[in-house]
Amino acid sequence: MKPILIQGAENSEINYFLEILKNKNEVEIGSFKFWTGEIFNLPIVVSRTKVGEINCAIATTIGILKFEPRCIINQGTAGSHSIDIHRGDIIVGEKYVNICNFQINYAEKGEYTNINRWNLKSYYSDDDKIISNNADLKLIEILKIIKNNIDEKLIFGTIGSGDIWNREVDRILYLHEKYGTLCEDMETAGAYNTANSFGIPIIGIRIISNNEITSEKYNPELSTDCQKFVEKVIKEIGKEIS
């Protein structure tokens, strides 16, 4: 049976999985670490991707080629892009947009920077479509089933992702209002692009760890809550497989 590949950028985003992983075995490839084992008698590979879009793309590529997963769950923490989305809420990324991939319209010297000149563009195709790679529809349906039987607040929509940590409220609100982003992280872009390129089903799950709009400070400990939720997702995937 092919494994489920679970990704987290930092130790805090995978430590719980490593605690519950049975028959654990560490595999190191280059500077990237993976752990194989079982959860709910399902074959699992846990990947520490390291932070950032490029690191995550490399880790995802290695994970796909080495372990041939049936699907990928990219999970961890994210910052809210909405006044109505708070710490502890969980975002399911039906799709993502790359919030670093801007084309900036020309301006003369002395006209200064203006956020309204900044437009998201796609550098993966020859057209003018915004980057918007999608999660796997079957995995989304599993999450929708889970939503009806949990206490956590689960929100489906668009994840903003890129090598940036926004703390300007105006920029955050601009991305939310213009592109519909619910939150932002630094890995979803690399994971989705790579998985989509290889045709591997993927879903992004992010717990809100901070909200600059409402002054909710960053709480990295919420990453454990995200992993415990993903544990429920793994169990549900197991029912679909059996």
Image (spheres, grey):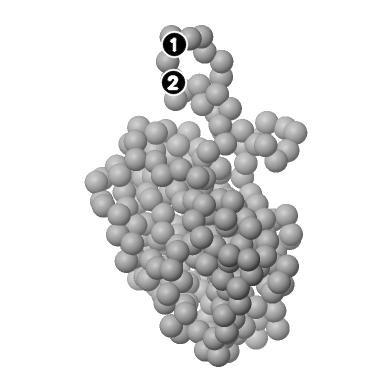
Q: Is residue 40 above or below residue 189?
A: below
Q: Are marks 2 and 1 in contact (CB under 8 Å)?
A: yes
Instruction: Tell me the residue at 30%/59% (across/down).
Output: 219
Mark 2 element type: loop
Amino acid on which disc 2 is placed: Asn
Using the rendered view, name the quadrant where residue 207 is placed: bottom left
- Quarter in which the C terminus is drawn: bottom right
Numbered tag placed on residue 159 in the rendering:
none
Say if residue 87 shows up in the picture: no
x, y percent for residue 123: 67, 37
Q: Is residue 95 left or right of residue 87?
A: right
Instruction: Tell me the residue at 46%/71% (across/down).
Output: 14
Q: Is residue 153 above or below residue 53?
A: below
Q: Nearer the viewer, residue 153 or 169?
A: 169
x, y percent for residue 113: 44, 20
Q: Which residue is mark 2?
A: 114
Q: Nearer the viewer, residue 158 or 67?
A: 67
Instruction: Tell me the residue at 68%/61% (across/down).
Output: 61
Mark 1 element type: loop
Q: Which residue is mark 1?
A: 111
x, y percent for residue 194: 67, 55
Q: Nearer the viewer, residue 240 or 80?
A: 80
